[in-house]
Image: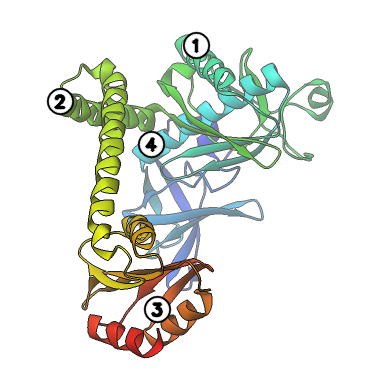
Amino acid sequence: MRERLYYRDPHCRSFRATVTSCEPKDDKWLITLSETAFYPEGGGQPCDLGTIDGEPVTDVREKNGKVLHLCAAPVPVGTEAACEIDWERRFDLMQQHSGEHIVSGLVHAKYGYENVGFHMGRDMITIDFNGMIDSAGLREIEIAANQVIWRNLPVEQLFPAPAELAELSFRSKKALSGEVRLVRFPGVDLCACCGTHVSCTGEIGIIQLLNCVKFHEGVRIELLCGGRALKYLQSMRDQNHSVSVRLSAKPLETGIAVERMANELQNLKERSSAAETELMAFKAERYRGAGKVTAFENDMDPGTLRRYADAVLNACGGSCALFSGSDEEGYSYVLASTDTDLRAVSKMMNAALRGRGGGKAECVQGRVGATGDQIRQWLQENL
């Protein structure tokens, strides 16, 4: 692996190398170099991007022991090419990957769980563990992970001989053969890994564990490290500042203010519901003893229309058909009766008036796509 500069110096941003092959691949070109700092996708880590002799590198893969660089244009064999790594992307991936190792090592040490899944997405990192962790445990792991950062530990890579490897206790998702690379965070984690990492834990900056949800027989943890964590904190700060201004509350008291507002809103809803019930009962009195009622109401949502139907049915003592909506957008409906099974009626009306809905024998509700005149005519002919 001597030609892989990303192992010798993970901070290598630019280098010169000889183009050893350049073959067409669809509408692009596969290029190999005498040595490379471009990391190929693998081990859960996305590949590096950058340029070779000014030509954009759009993908990097490993095949048959060779690192293949996919470029938009050819670079002649024998060219001593100036190569540039997209350093902002590389350093971000190093921060995320190193943070993942620290969290996985701490979880393994505390709970004995194995990391059974790892995904480094564009926005979020996820780790899957084969055991349960509660919110208190998650907070403890987050504190411990950031303490590892504050200690600024060196990050070491080892290529142990087979006999030495057999004596070491390290994390690995699968059986290994051939030359094995181990990455060590002293006292925290020792893991078989082919990815790139920071040189010392202080370069990670910060680790945030955002969420922990049940996943299969264990949990999935969402986390952000370094620059991604900083951007997330900045967004949260900006959002909380906006909320604090609107609520006239101090930034650390927005939760209390929101709870107070939620209680006030609930009280208003209860008072509004009580007032609406009284209003419905008052409006329904016009149908006292009518027996059968058909009515069109303005601006009633399906829930309100259903409650109004109860009030009308109680007053009329027979059946009611209530509608609310417009000819342009269609009508919500509620049919209610004290003595008729309305399920067949609803099915017929839906078929005739481009509707859908249903319910119980005594009450059905739904929506039709007909005009008010079409509804009235159908009701006249069928009810």
Which type of secondary structure does the marked residue at label 3 adopt? strand
Q: Nearer the viewer, residue 371 or 257?
A: 371
Residue 271, compared with residue 26, is above or below; it is above
Q: Residue at x 30, y 70 (%)?
A: 323
**What label does residue 13 carry, if any?**
4
Residue pointed to by mark 2:
245
Distance of label 3 from label 1 (alpha carbons): 62 Å
Separation of residues labelled 3 and 4 (CA atoms): 64 Å
- Of marks 1 and 2, which one's residue comes earlier in the chain? 1
According to the picture, the residue beneath numbered tag 3 turns out to be 355
Residue 91 sits in quarter: top left
Q: Earlier in the sequence, mark 3 or mark 4?
A: 4
Q: Which mark is nearer the camera, 4 or 2?
A: 2
Q: Residue at x 29, y 43 (%)?
A: 273
Quarter containing the N terminus: top right
- Callout 2 amino acid: Val
The residue type indicated by label 1 comes to: Gln
Say what secondary structure mark 2 lies in. Answer: helix
- Which of discs 3 and 1 lies nearer the camera? The answer is 3
Give the CA distance from mark 4 to mark 2: 44 Å
Q: Which residue is mark 1?
A: 147
* Position of 379 relative to 312 (above/below): below
In the structure shown, which secondary structural element does the residue marked by tag 4 occupy?
loop
Instruction: Name the image colouring.
Output: rainbow
Which of the two labelled residues, at mark 4 and mark 2, occupies the earlier sequence position? 4
The 10 Å Cα crowd at callout 4, few under 14, some 14 to 19, many 20 or more, is some
* Image coordinates for residue 316, horizontal then vertical, percent: 35, 65
Q: CA distance from mark 4 to mark 1?
A: 29 Å
Question: Whole-percent x and y of residue 304?
Answer: 32, 55
Q: Kindly report the distance in space between the C-alpha atoms of the residues bearing marks 1 and 2.
A: 34 Å
